[in-house]
Amino acid sequence: MDSPGLSRHEQQILRRIETTLEQDGRFGRRMHALERKRSRLGRPRWTPGMSLTVLAVLSLSLAITAVLTSRTYLAVAFGAVSGVAITAALTWLCATRQKQQP
């Protein structure tokens, strides 16, 4: 795993560290356990799109309920949830756009 950016001395130190880690049985067991967990998990179950969908449905239901019942606290709750949903949507869109740019 030599990198062209490392000096010869740094490469030797890296090789010593890798050799030590390879000989450590406890470290090896932990790495194998981590790899098994990672393979079991697969893809993430909760995505940002799902979060935004839940927030949008909650916001819409609060808006409808606030209009039908004319309750002030429901209108305030609608405003709060809508603010969180808009902030989350903008954050998600900005992060997605940054990943797409070279």
Image (cartoon, grey):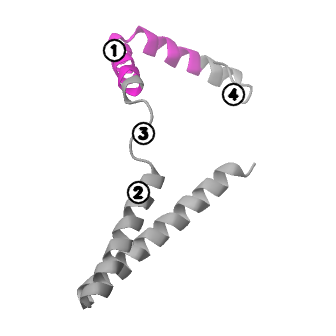
Q: Quadrant of residue 80?
A: bottom left
Residue hosting label 1: 29
Q: What amino acid type is highlighted by mark number 1?
A: Arg
The reply to whether the magenta stretch includes residue 34 is: yes
Q: How far, Cα to Cα, is label 2 from label 3?
A: 13 Å
Please give the name of the residue rendered at 37% of the width and 72% of the height, measured from the top-left corner: 59
In the displayed structure, would residue 37 be above or below residue 94?
above
Residue hosting label 2: 51
- Which tag, 1 or 3, sits closer to the chain's start? 1
Q: What amino acid type is highlighted by mark number 3?
A: Pro
Please give the name of the residue rendered at 32% of the width and 86% of the height, measured from the top-left corner: 67
Q: Which of 33 and 71 lies nearest the eye of the viewer? A: 71
Rate crowding at label 1 as few (under 14), some (14 to 19) or many (20 or more) other CA atoms within 10 Å: few
Q: What amino acid type is highlighted by mark number 2?
A: Ser
Residue 102, image x and y in percent? 75, 48
Rate crowding at label 2 as few (under 14), some (14 to 19) or many (20 or more) other CA atoms within 10 Å: few
- Which tag, 4 or 3, sits closer to the chain's start? 4
Do the numbered discs 1 and 3 sit on residues whose CB atoms are within 8 Å? no
The reply to whether the magenta stretch includes residue 22 is: yes
Task: Specify the principal SS of the magenta part.
Answer: helix
- Which tag, 2 or 1, sits closer to the chain's start? 1
Residue 5, image x and y in percent? 72, 30
- Which tag, 2 or 3, sits closer to the chain's start? 3
Q: Which of 82 and 2 lies nearest the eye of the viewer? A: 82
Q: Which quadrant, please, contains the N terminus?
A: top right
